[in-house]
Image (cartoon, rainbow, N blue to C red):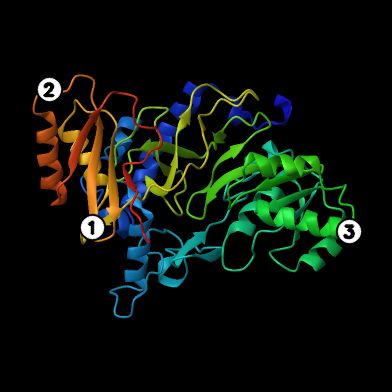
Amino acid sequence: MANAHIDPLALRPSAEREAALMALLPAQVRAAQALPAYAAGLAGVDAAGITSRAALARLPVTRKSELLQRQQAGRDEGAAQHDPFGGFSAIGWRALSAGRPARRVYQSPGPIYEPEGSGADYWRSARALQAAGFQAGDLVHNCFSYHLTPGAWIMESGAHALGCSVFPGGTGNTEQQLQAMQHLRPDAYTGTPSFLRILLEKAAEAGQALTHLKKALVSGEAFPPSLRDWLAERGVHGYQAYATAECGVIAYETTAREGLVLDEGVIVEIVRPGTDEPLPDGEVGEVVVTTLNPDYPMLRLGTGDLSAVLPGHCPTGRTNTRIRGWLGRADQTAKVRGMFVHPGQVAAVARRHPELGRVRLVVAGEMANDSMTLHAECAAPAEGLAAAVAATVRDLTKLRADIEIVPPGSLPNDGKLIEDARSYR
């Protein structure tokens, strides 16, 4: 794609982007401090001093489980103040709005409720659509659900920002969808990749040609190369976007197909699972996102998704950081002999023994007769290291574990701190 069709913000020098993002951070921290959900965790924080990634990393990570818990407490009968957003939103309705009404309210599984504020391209999906080849004048067949969840609205708002028209197909009703596609001849598709495959297969079975459909932006599911190639063989070039209901679009694929480029409106960190600690570039960890949205200021939101930073810039000319895409889930909590063992506890073992590199706790055996082995990388283990590490594991987890010291590079770079290898027969 020629640079003329790329948002200029995506082409700016990396140092210029970083300076601009860091300059916006203090206002975001102040917006969060004004909300009940963040007040305690940010008490005493000087917002004016949060102008670097190192300063940002000193703030606590908020994970989705906490978001859900606070929302549940805020909507329970008898709550001090009815707040279905759990104190995370600066917009809403009636007493919640502070004069700033929400345009829409959505429900995601949990249930978790998210507000939508005003403004064009609120979810910042236009860049992702543009990278997939969408342009003004296109008709977009939008097959994300318009019911309860924000997926359809995320894509529709970005399409409108580009000057596209949208047919709100929603989900299901395959025959009606195909009839509409025959009549309207849309240029592009948004929705899950699996439903696009169903539509193309059903069209082929009915002897219908969808030759007008040339491009797609998909999300909400894995998009393996095999499915990408299957679509391309049928004339549809599909690209993927990584988005959440809380943060909007986080990253998107380009024609280079080399990872996902971060959106211009978010600050992304990769942290060690179960902790608040950023990892070096290239290491697999949890995706943590800070949005620059005063309406719903997500400050270091732990998505629970695993990814890693890729080196270099996108060959299309976009200069923002790239990530590898979705690599699994960060929550690896295991229950061993009646006790929960969390990734944060395993990370704490490594912190107490800085001579260790990557560590992985493997839980093996059968349920009710299981065992734990901590595999730990170390270049030059001192005498007694294994015994000391075993004592730390017992101190932190209240459970015994065997310790296996292995050479650096022995453990995979996949972000996994706990591997449950038990038999569940």
User: Residue 28: image x %, image y %?
Assistant: 39, 44
Instruction: State whether residue 237 appears in this view.
Output: no
Mark carried by residue 382: 2
Q: Earlier in the sequence, mark 3 or mark 2?
A: 3
Secondary structure of the residue carrying tag 3 is helix
Describe residue 414's horizontal placement relative to residue 216 as left or right: left
Question: Looking at the picture, which amino acid does disc 2 mark?
Answer: Ala
Closer to the camera, 122 or 3?
3
Where's the C terminus, which quadrant?
Answer: bottom left
Closer to the camera, 326 or 255?
326
**Toward which corner of the image does residue 124 lie, by quadrant?**
top right
Report which residue position mark 1 lands on.
369
| Disc 1 from disc 3: Cα separation | 60 Å
Residue visible at 31% across and 58% down in the picture:
37
Q: Is residue 237 above or below residue 202?
A: above
User: Residue 360: image x %, image y %?
Assistant: 29, 39
Question: Looking at the picture, which amino acid does disc 3 mark?
Answer: Gln
Mark carried by residue 182: 3
- Extreme residue toward the bottom, this view: 77
**Toward which corner of the image does residue 26 lie, by quadrant?**
top left
